[in-house]
Image (tube, rainbow, N blue to C red):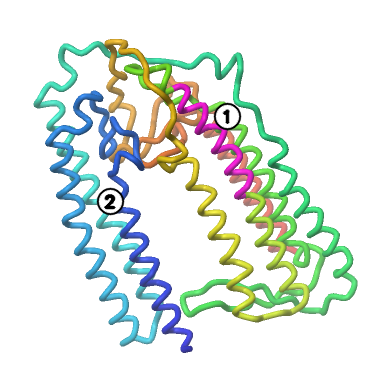
């Protein structure tokens, strides 16, 4: 089958999946129930007519935009014989979704202020102190699969290295399809993907450690039930992230084997990349599915609502900026999971260190 046609079909599928994700994003099952479109509202207003109206408007405009961009991507891509059109269409769709989200965010913000939704309500903050005295533990057994795959990769590479040819071929994704980049055989090029496995393993362990210390998402109106739900989801997320790391290492092992043997089979490459990637996506999504979040039980009414903290959120509820908050990770408002506190000094210092180390590694590779 023509490579450009395959790329067009893949890009169109990506566009449709992207549209489906954006369509589902405002659902209370995929975002915090009391934060529609990134706007904090009292629990009793989470299903207010204004919220339903903005969801309908957002989706009513997003659906035709997705259909038009998908059709244009196929048509223009076929006429120009270029799969790059699909990538541009995906960027445009992201822009359209962002504009529609911002419009809904602003409309709900106005409705909340003009309607006085927080007037005569007692606002408060609930904390689960047991996460410090009896924290969710790091599931070290779930790190073992990543370490085993890493050990197998390093051992196989050590045996293969003396027999490697002078040139290695590394598969790369480009707008025109999969291409192979020639690399001179050195220790660093031969074991490059093994080193990436090590980086993936360390990154996943570090991410899980940070998530386990993230600020808990506890609803002041139902603290016990929401704390129990958060603790359960936290344990699932920790295991899920480490499982995803192991699957990524399996994919990198397969790519290393193809590079060491010089195999350029497209079908094998699709299996080596596609199967672990699909399983990794499923593992990453599972902790946030309704079936994994159920079972928290009921809670007594406290008479409080979670404090209106919209002033600390920027970019339509997607970015958290609070220099007075010591937390590095905080619960997301858009989607499920955690995001970073962009005003946290420890985070900024860590980012600076990573940038310096990345620049240094780039210079070493360039000089080598």
Report x, y in % for residue 355: 59, 46
Q: In the drawing, does residue 158 fall left or right of residue 182?
A: right
The residue that disc 2 covers is: 98
- The CA distance from mark 2 to mark 1 is 30 Å
Point 13% across, 36% down: residue: 50
Quadrant assignment for the C terminus? bottom right
Q: Which is more toward the observer, 25 or 341?
A: 25
The stretch in magenta equals 227-244
Check disc 1: other Cα within 10 Å, few if <14, some if 14-19, many if 20+. many
The residue that disc 1 covers is: 212
Report x, y in % for residue 28: 30, 39
Q: Which is more toward the observer, 89 or 322?
A: 89
Q: Is residue 319 magenta?
A: no
Q: Quadrant of residue 33?
A: top left
Point 70% across, 76% down: residue: 169
| Kind of element beneath mark 2 | helix
Report x, y in % for residue 366: 69, 63
Point 26% across, 40% down: residue: 37
Q: In the drawing, does residue 4 fall left or right of residue 197?
A: left
Nearest to the eye among marks 2 and 1: give it: 1
């Amino acid at each position: 089958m023509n490579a450009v046609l395959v790329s067009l079909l893949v890009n169109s599928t990506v566009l449709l999946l992207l549209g489906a994700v954006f369509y589902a994003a405002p659902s209370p099952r995929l975002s915090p129930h009391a934060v529609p479109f990134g706007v904090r509202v009292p629990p009793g207003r989470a299903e207010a007519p204004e919220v339903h109206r903005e969801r309908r408007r957002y989706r009513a405009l997003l659906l035709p935009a997705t259909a038009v961009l998908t059709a244009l991507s196929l048509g223009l891509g076929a006429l120009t014989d270029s799969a790059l059109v699909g990538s541009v269409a995906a960027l445009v769709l992201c822009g359209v979704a962002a504009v529609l989200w911002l419009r809904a965010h602003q409309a709900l913000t106005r409705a909340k202020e003009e309607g006085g939704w927080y007037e005569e309500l007692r606002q408060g903050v609930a904390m689960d102190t047991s996460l410090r005295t009896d924290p969710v533990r790091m599931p070290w057994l779930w790190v073992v699969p990543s370490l085993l795959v890493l050990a197998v990769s390093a051992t196989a590479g050590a045996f293969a290295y003396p027999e490697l040819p002078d040139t290695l071929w590394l598969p790369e994704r480009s707008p025109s399809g999969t291409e192979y980049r020639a690399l001179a055989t050195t220790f660093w090029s031969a074991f490059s993907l093994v080193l990436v496995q090590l980086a993936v393993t360390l990154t996943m362990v570090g991410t899980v450690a940070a998530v386990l210390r993230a600020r808990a998402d506890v609803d002041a109106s139902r603290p016990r039930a929401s704390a129990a739900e958060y603790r359960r989801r936290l344990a699932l997320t920790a295991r899920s992230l480490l499982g995803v790391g192991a699957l990524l290492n399996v994919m990198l092992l397969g790519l290393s084997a193809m590079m060491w043997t010089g195999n350029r089979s497209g079908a094998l490459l699709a299996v080596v990349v596609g199967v672990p990637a699909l399983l990794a996506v499923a593992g990453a999504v599972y902790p946030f599915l309704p079936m994994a979040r159920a079972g928290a039980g009921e809670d007594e009414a406290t008479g409080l609502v979670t404090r209106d903290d919209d002033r600390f959120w920027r970019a339509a509820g997607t970015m958290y900026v609070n220099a007075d908050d010591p937390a590095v990770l905080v619960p997301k408002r858009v989607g499920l999971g955690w995001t970073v506190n962009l005003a946290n000094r420890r985070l900024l210092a860590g980012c600076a260190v990573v940038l310096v180390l990345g620049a240094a590694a780039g210079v070493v590779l360039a000089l080598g």
